[in-house]
Image (cartoon, rainbow, N blue to C red):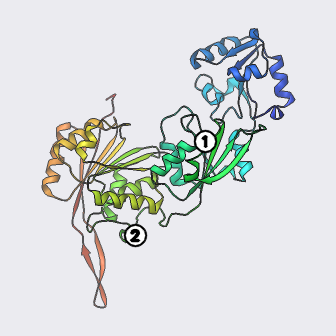
């Protein structure tokens, strides 16, 4: 039998049942700090090191003995319990929940934690989940580490241009040195914090423009005529078939309108908007701020330079709104993830033919769409239909690696 025990944040959180299970266990497994704190004898302890070996030894002993695995807080909230589910089926373990650091911090600051998006940066370098949460949620709880301290996180958000948020920091929870602080990002970036901390980010300002599909052109900053029109955006996004965790590269992003609407569809994903013109870059950044679409990463570069840098992670989707030269298309094809989708917009017939020929050379499936939209316009006491310029959209998909 394997019991995975949440110990909470302090001895007061440990029920008599949990303590009895630990005392009667043949093997007690966990981090060295918890094993030492509970004074587990050497002949009964298994210290966490390599997770593969740790799980293998637990499985071996659990065949004819009772095993307890110790977890800080709650074992299934970014804890050892979640890690062990990679090695054991749920029915092979009995989980004992307890009070987590996130739950405790929310209680201290009066934050309803059912509204919190929980993000762990502990031992991680991928910050995409943080920016996605800041785009879609009002509260974001962050598990931190030495690299991602409150001052480092605040500085990172300020560099990204993020505003309209404040930071709650809970240090040394359930300890005599516990300290609770609510502060601005600018102030948090200048302070030194205890290594044991948890952050709650709270939105304090609603973005001026609601992030939604079908954004009005006059609501966004853009150079005259340099914006993907609303019907084209809608059709292009449908052809991309974005999943919630997709990584989209919007190449030749212009005003960033496609990036913004794509971000509305991505709850856990990322959008990289690449634009070489400085004025258009300013427009994209302004539109990101207007909508609070912080998961859009804005990159100032030519397409050739950006694609030549070996950027990672590889995109699952690419929208090429301009600059569809043979060299750019070839680089896109090489960098796109297996099974990834590519949509190319073309206004000129030469661009259409170049993109069609290049995709045909790749022997990828290709469908060419022509989109011509008419909108009503007043004419005397009646209406007339005014056509927009026709746009071609080429959709294709990179073959999966196993085909």
Q: Judge whether 89 appears above or below 282 on screen.
A: above
Q: Is residue 216 visible?
A: yes
Q: Which mark is residue 84?
A: none
Q: Secondary structure at mark 1?
A: loop
Q: Residue furthest top?
A: 43
- Residue lying at 62% horizontally and 30% vertically, measured from the top left: 82
Give how far across and how far down residue 106 sits, in percent: 70, 48
- Residue lying at 58% horizontally and 34% vertically, measured from the top left: 145
Residue 80 image-quadrant placement:
top right
In the rendered view of the protein, which quadrant contains the C terminus?
A: top left
Q: Secondary structure at mark 2?
A: helix
Q: Is mark 1 in CB contact (under 8 Å) with mark 2?
A: no
Count residues near mark 1 (Cα–Cα under 10 Å), then give few for <14, some for 14-19, many for 20+.
few
Q: Nearer the viewer, residue 162 or 84?
A: 162
Q: Residue furthest right?
A: 16
Q: Which residue is mark 1?
A: 192
Residue 233 image-quadrant placement:
bottom left
Mark 1 to mark 2 CA distance (whole Å): 41 Å
Give how far across and how far down residue 186 sits, in percent: 54, 53
Q: Nearer the viewer, residue 62 or 270?
A: 270
Answer left or right for 100 relative to 325: right
In the rendered view of the protein, which quadrant contains the N terminus?
A: top right
Count residues near mark 2 (Cα–Cα under 10 Å), then give few for <14, some for 14-19, many for 20+.
few
Q: Which mark is residue 219?
A: 2
Give how far across and how far down residue 87 sits, in percent: 59, 22
Give how far across and how far down residue 294 sits, in percent: 46, 53
- Residue lying at 43% horizontally and 46% vertically, measured from the top left: 270
Count of picture labels: 2
Sequence-earlier tag: 1 or 2: 1
Q: Is residue 267 visible?
A: no
């Amino acid at each position: 039998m394997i019991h995975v025990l949440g110990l909470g944040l302090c001895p007061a959180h440990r029920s008599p049942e949990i303590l009895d299970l630990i005392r009667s266990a043949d093997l007690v497994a966990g981090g060295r700090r918890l094993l030492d704190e509970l004074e587990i004898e050497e002949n009964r302890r298994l210290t966490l090191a390599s997770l593969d070996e740790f799980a293998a030894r637990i499985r071996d002993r659990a065949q004819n003995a009772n095993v307890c695995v110790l977890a800080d807080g709650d074992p299934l909230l970014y804890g050892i319990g979640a890690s062990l589910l990679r090695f054991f089926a749920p029915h092979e373990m009995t989980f004992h929940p307890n009070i987590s650091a996130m739950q405790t911090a929310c209680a201290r600051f009066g934050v309803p934690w059912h509204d919190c998006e929980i993000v762990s940066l502990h031992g991680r370098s991928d910050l995409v989940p943080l920016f996605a949460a800041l785009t879609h949620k009002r509260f974001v709880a962050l598990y931190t580490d030495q690299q991602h301290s409150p001052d480092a996180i605040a500085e990172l958000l300020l560099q990204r241009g993020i505003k309209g948020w404040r930071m709650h920091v809970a240090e040394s929870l359930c300890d005599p040195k516990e300290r609770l602080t609510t502060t601005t990002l600018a102030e948090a970036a200048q302070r030194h914090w205890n290594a044991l901390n948890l952050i709650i980010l709270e939105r304090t300002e609603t973005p001026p423009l609601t992030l939604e599909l079908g954004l009005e052109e006059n609501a966004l900053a853009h150079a005259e005529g340099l914006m993907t029109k609303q019907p084209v955006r809608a059709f292009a996004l449908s052809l991309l078939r974005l999943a919630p965790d997709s990584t989209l590269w919007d190449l030749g992003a212009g005003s960033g309108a496609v990036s913004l609407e794509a971000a509305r569809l991505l709850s856990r994903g990322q959008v990289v908007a690449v634009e070489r013109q400085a004025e258009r870059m300013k427009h994209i950044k302004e539109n990101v701020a207007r909508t609070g679409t912080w998961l859009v990463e804005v990159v100032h570069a030519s397409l050739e330079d950006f694609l030549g840098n070996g950027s990672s992670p590889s995109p699952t989707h690419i929208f090429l709104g301009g600059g569809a030269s043979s060299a750019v298309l070839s680089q896109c094809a090489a960098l796109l993830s297996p099974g990834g989708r590519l949509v190319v917009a073309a206004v000129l017939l030469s661009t259409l033919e170049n993109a069609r020929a290049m995709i045909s050379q790749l022997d990828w499936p290709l469908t060419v769409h022509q989109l011509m939209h008419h909108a009503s316009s007043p004419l005397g006491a009646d209406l007339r239909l005014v056509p927009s310029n026709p746009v071609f959209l080429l959709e294709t998909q990179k073959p999966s690696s196993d085909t």
